[in-house]
């Protein structure tokens, strides 16, 4: 299955990698590797992950928490495509990213 990234989600990933590299050189690369592994899991079983619990399941947003980092990958699977809507820190306000999914439709 193919992944489609929102441009803002890609920017979030880039900023997060930069931030972690400032915290400790190489930590951004570790974040990127964990993210890549998690994306492989999403591609293999997109319907195997929890719905975003603060939203109705009818919206079909799912989430995967990254191991080792306080981040969620928020995505919306369809028959042929998985839309990556956000890569969000878990302490950020809930659902701030919600409009992105609606704007890209």
Image (tube, rainbow, N blue to C red):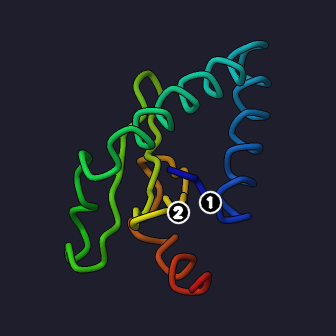
Q: Is residue 101 left or right of residue 25?
A: left
Which is more toward the observer, 66 or 43?
43
Q: Residue at x 52, y 70 (%)?
A: 97
Question: Are the two marked residues, 1 and 2, in contact with CB atoms closer than 8 angstroms?
Answer: yes
Q: Check the image and report above or below for 26 versus 71.
A: above
Circle 1 sits in a helix, a strand or a loop, which is it?
strand
Q: Check the image and report above or below for 4 versus 30.
A: below
Q: Is residue 37 left or right of residue 17?
A: left
Neighbor class of circle 1 (other Cα within 10 Å; few <14, some 14-19, many 20+) is: few
Q: How many marks?
A: 2
Q: Residue at x 44, y 59 (%)?
A: 75
Point out residue 66 in the picture as x, y percentages from the top left corner: 43, 33
Q: Which residue is mark 2?
A: 83
Q: Check the image and report above or below for 66 versus 91.
A: above
Label of residue 51 in the image: none
Circle 2 sits in a helix, a strand or a loop, which is it?
strand
Q: Residue at x 45, y 43 (%)?
A: 43
Which is more toward the observer, 80 or 8?
80
Q: Residue at x 53, y 24 (%)?
A: 34
Q: Is residue 39 left or right of residue 47?
A: right
Point out residue 60 in the picture as x, y percentages from the top left corner: 30, 71
Q: Which residue is mark 1?
A: 4
Q: Is residue 52 left or right of residue 81?
A: left
């Amino acid at each position: 299955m193919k992944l489609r990234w929102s441009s803002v989600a890609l920017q979030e990933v880039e900023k997060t990698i930069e931030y972690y590299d400032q915290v400790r050189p190489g930590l951004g690369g570790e974040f990127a590797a964990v993210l890549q592994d998690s994306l492989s899991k999403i591609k293999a079983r997109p319907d195997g992950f929890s719905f975003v619990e603060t939203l109705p399941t009818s919206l079909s947003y799912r989430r995967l928490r990254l191991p080792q980092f306080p981040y969620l990958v928020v995505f919306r699977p369809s028959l042929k495509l998985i839309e990556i809507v956000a890569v969000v820190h878990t302490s950020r306000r809930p659902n701030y990213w919600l409009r992105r999914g609606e704007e890209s439709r």
